[in-house]
Image (tube, coloured by chain):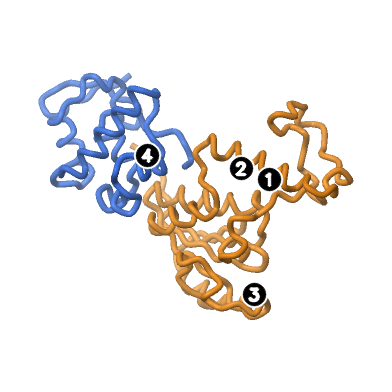
Chain colours: A orange, B blue
Amino acid sequence: MSEYEPVKKVSLVCAKGGLEEVYPSLIMANGARMEGIDASIFFTFFGLNAIIKKTHNNLKVATVGNAALNMAMPMLKMPITIPFPTLLGAIPGISNFATWLMKNEMEKLDVPPVGEFLEMCDDAGVEIYACKMTVDMFKLTMDDFVPQVKGIMTVGEFYKKSAGAQIIFT
Amino acid sequence: MATREIAGATVEVDSDGYMTDHKSWNKEIADAFAKEQGIDELTDRHNIVIEFMRKEFEENGTGPSIRKLNKQSGVSTKELYQLFPGGPAKKAALIAGIPKPQGCI
């Protein structure tokens, strides 16, 4: 039916650990598997928070220094053109509130919480890796990670693993 | 709207080959679609998924997400990928005679 050459393999790099920064990697990796595309995610720097047992279910939406954050959040019912004031974002609890709003909306769209999403990705055949350099910097070991993490890789190993893949930095 | 011959019947399909009227679906059509997708035989496990998808579609007007299948159909995500290799939601919808799933999840 279609004549284009489909993507066969993707390698995603997730370097940031905000909830709104981790979801895209998970959605794109899972979505790739749904299309029969091989997928792996390489978590690095603060992106590691998404796969650390103690932090992965407590990721937050950044309400400070997030230039694109706006007032179009549900319930607030304000236009998307009004930015969310950074000063407000610094008030204790505001980030939790924004996170709660986003999680609520995600649930309505049938997007699971991060922990369940990692399980879903793993079951779907997404390969999940942690970056060796950041793991060393944060003094972490495999025991700190959720069981879906397949291993700790260097950048070189990541590139080797990504042979023939489209590499996507989210 | 295009039509195609499958398992001795003429059915209406969309541009991606998905049936547009799930009521004209039957088991023989399912078998024929499955063979085209490289699934030689539809087992009881396949049929659980197919029936769940059809029921969901009839109730909600859209097929279920993989998450819902995992939680409610009794077939895990892992098994789902084994049953329908290369894209479970898409392939199962095609075989079940319902439209292509529109969600990203």
Quarter of the rendering containing residue B32: top left
Mark closest to the chain's N terminus, 3 or 2? 2
Q: Compute the Cα span from label 3 to label 4.
A: 42 Å
- Where the C terminus of chain A falls, by quadrant? bottom right
- Estimate the x, y position of residue A148 in percent, counting from the top left: 45, 64
Q: Compute the Cα span from label 3 to label 2.
A: 27 Å
Question: Is the C-beta separation of discs 1 and 2 under 8 Å?
Answer: yes
Quarter of the rendering containing residue A70: top right
Q: Mark 2 points at which residue?
A: A103
Which mark, residue A99?
Answer: 1
- Estimate the x, y position of residue A62 in percent, counting from the top left: 74, 51
Mark closest to the chain's N terminus, 3 or 1? 1
Q: Mark 3 points at which residue?
A: A134
Which residue does the image show at 42% across and 43% down from the upper left? B67
Tag 2: amino acid: Lys
Are dots 3 and 4 on a single chain?
yes
Q: What chain does mark 1 sit on?
A: A
Does A6 appear above or below B63? Answer: below
Observer-side mark, 2 or 4, equals: 2
Circle 3 SS class:
helix
- Estimate the x, y position of residue A83 in percent, counting from the top left: 82, 37
